[in-house]
Amino acid sequence: MRTLRALALCITLLATLTAAGQKPAPLVIISLDGMRPDYITHADEHGIKAPTLRSFLTEGTYAEGVTGVIPTITYASHTTIITGVWPTEHGIYTNVTFDPFRQHPNQWYFYANAIKVETLYQAADKAGLKTGAVAWPVSIGAPIDYNIAEFAQSEQTDNPDGSPYNPPDILAQLGIEKIPGEDADVRRTRQAIGIITRFKPTLMLIHLVNLDHDEHSHGPFSPQADATLETLDSQVAEIIRAALSVDPATRIAIVSDHGFVPVDHHVNLNALFAQEGLIQTGAPKPPSKALTVTSWTAQAWPSGGVAAIVLKDPNDKAMLAKVKALLDKAKANPEYGIAAILDAEELHKRGGFATASFLVDFKDGYAIGNKLAGPIVEDASGTGTHGYLPSHPDLRSTFMIKGKGIAAGRDLHIIDMRQLAPTFANLLHVTLPAAKIQPVNLKP
């Protein structure tokens, strides 16, 4: 009997060890840039037909909203989604790098080597799992096995710091030709399906952008944005079909990076700073018609609904006091639409802009402009933006997931964006040492 019991224990232990060592089911994470959760949770109120995305509410687990990071903007948020930490920890503070002399306009945080902590795809790679990505922000040079990175919004290949393609001939391997003028999300959808079906990665990251573009141009829940959301629904359905055809156990997660609000006014704080002598300007350098910056002591770093205020010498107490007085005066003027001003201590405690001395958060309807001269406040009616403090309810983002082992019909209510990375890590049987916040419960 003892021999039989010992044998049974050995068999149980062996089964446990085998199960623990099994490769996890594939995980596909699809980011729908700028999708507020109420596009789906309140689809009927907006007349939106999105059967694929709405199926997550009954077949999977979802959040009514995800509280994001400072600022609620694309590159900072996407990096938090795959690291589980705030921007001050992962190093991607916003979309564009701080460029006070405007020598490198539109230089975004494209390169993965700027991320200071371990990412989900790095943890997966260490565990021997295959990874893939299409247009995931901050991924040029990332250790992703099959990668088509986002670069300059056009996926250029002549980048002097490295190609956005890994392997370099990935498009040829997939048999995908570039089609001039092809819609960005149509291209990204077919690239993603190609990687999923040919290379079968265990972790796949996908970033679709058209909804964000239409919301910027026309505002959230505009006819244009609603129509794009319905198109996205069909593209998500295509990706899901492809993933399940490879492995029926695949889990599909839908995320977004931020919500959106309508905007009526742009506030050019840098024009105000120039008027007060904090920025000195020079003549444009042809062919540009924009003024140049010749010197500066304080400057606004625009991020949609917020502006980080950077001082050339953050230890200059007299300048700190002068800038604070200027900002307080601006906040007292209702025309500027300033909702709140955070000092450095409060800002950094909440994980935003490690190099800034202040943060200006605007009221809904107002957003930061970036002109150096002219009117401080300009009309921007009919547009939209994001970037505001994550405490704005309309800036909450989306999380939905379904598939094998995922609870059906579970409402997580409001969660923290930092919970997503450790949740995904659990599904992949990997760990993220920097992520300290608890994952959400997905088990039935």
Image (cartoon, rainbow, N blue to C red):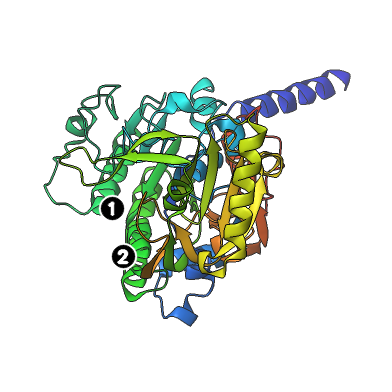
The percent coordinates of residue 101 (x first, y second) are 37, 34
Q: Is residue 133 above or below residue 370?
A: above
Q: On the picture, is 211 further left or further right than 394?
A: left
Q: Residue furthest right?
A: 2
Give me the residue at 77% from left, 21% from top. 7
Q: Which residue is mark 2?
A: 231
Q: Which residue is mark 1?
A: 185
The percent coordinates of residue 401 (x first, y second) are 54, 54
Q: Nearer the viewer, residue 73 or 304?
A: 304
Neighbours of disc 2 within 10 Å: few (<14), some (14-19), many (20+): some
Whether residues under marks 1 and 2 lie with C-beta atoms below 8 angstroms apart, the answer is: yes
Give me the residue at 73% from left, 24% from top. 13
Q: Amino acid at mark 1?
A: Asp
Q: Residue furthest top?
A: 3
Q: Is residue 165 above or below residue 374?
A: above
Secondary structure under badge 1? Answer: helix
Q: Amino acid at mark 2?
A: Thr
Give me the residue at 24% from left, 30% from top. 170
Quadrant of the rendered image containing residue 318 = top right
Q: Nearer the viewer, residue 141 or 365?
A: 365
